Amino acid sequence: MSKSQRLRRADELDAVRLVNECRELGDDAMAWQKRLVDGLLSFTGGMVSAVGVAAPHEAGRLDELDKWTRQQIDGGWPSAKIRDRWMDLVSTPEMIMEHPGTKAFFQRPEPNLSCVRQELVANAEWDRSAFVNDYLRADGFDEGLVSRTTVPAVGASYVLTVMRERGAKPFSSGVSQWVAFLQQELACHLGKSLLVTLQPNRHGLSPRLLQVLDRLLDGDSERQAALCLGLHPSTVHDYVKRLYRHFGVNSRPELLAYFLRRYSTRRPT
């Protein structure tokens, strides 16, 4: 990137700040990704945004898009009716691949890529697209941006997209550069301090399971946890086995390692 193309320091700080705000919510995959969506819409001025985990990228492979659409977190829809219509559309990957920008993006080979529409599809092709006119513009949307980055911690990709309102100023290449920088900042935390929806986490555990988990993370033995919580040791042992199943581990060291990998600098809340 040339000097004239470099991001402003203030924009870089905005991205870092957004990532840090997401990390504060990092053990709740829904909450931090909702914050990410809000931040993307605020910075870009977009209308609708969606983010989420996808299968590892392989050019043109539809199951990458299918997994993303089933797990995405989104926001900014003008109405529930429009959102429902688009959820129906994206439930059929062959249909959403009629979107010229989506098709071009998923056919590109780069595992890490951030583009605005103009970098993917020429104006003439975009304007004559039946999908653009019959779906996007009919619902008040137009072009946008899309980005993906690899997530080694979970063997997947992380994809985000923003659509702008019809008639609004097109996104510039500078916006895609900011999103690429944001993805770089996210990448080292995804699957670690930022849990993704593929991963088991604390949320959804009962209050008693959370209490037992906290005792284990504090170094207590099962007997010590039972004494502290006023439970029978066999009851705690049963809770421990349920925790192992929930987190996909087979032993106390594996459970501790699971949390150490994800919370090396802070204790989950």
Image: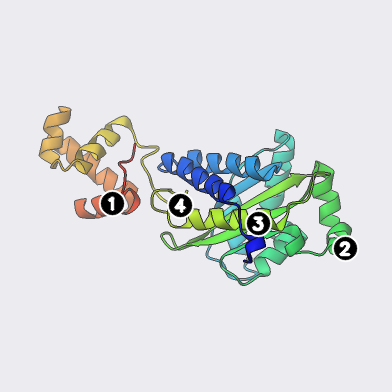
Residue 261: x and y in percent read 32, 54
Q: Which mark is residue 190?
A: none
Local crowd size for mark 4, using a 10 Å CA cut-off: few (<14), some (14–19), many (≥20)? some
As helix, strand or loop, the secondary structure at mark 2 comes to helix
Q: Quadrant of the C terminus?
A: top left
Q: Position of residue 206 (x, y in %)?
A: 33, 33
Q: Secondary structure at mark 4?
A: loop
Nearer-N-terminus badge (1/2): 2
Residue at 67% across / 53% down in the picture? 175
Mark 4, residue position: 198
Q: Kindly indicate whether the residue at mark 1 contacts the one at mark 4 (C-beta within 8 angstroms).
A: no
Point out residue 243 in the picture as x, y percentages from the top left corner: 28, 44
- At 26% across and 54% down in the image, what residue appears? 257
Marks 3/1: CA–CA distance: 33 Å
Residues at marks 2 and 3 touching, judged by CB atoms closer than 8 Å? no
Q: CA distance from mark 2 to mark 3?
A: 21 Å
Disc with the residue nearer the chain's start (4 vs 2): 2
- Classify mark 1: residues with Cα within 10 Å, few (<14), some (14-19) or many (20+): some
Q: Are marks 3 and 1 in contact (CB under 8 Å)?
A: no
Q: Which residue is mark 2?
A: 124
Quarter of the view holding residue 234: top left
Q: Which residue is mark 1?
A: 260
Judged by depth in the image, the label closer to the viewer, 2 or 3, is 3
Q: Which residue is mark 3?
A: 176
Task: Measure the alpha-carbon separation of dots 4 and 2.
Answer: 39 Å
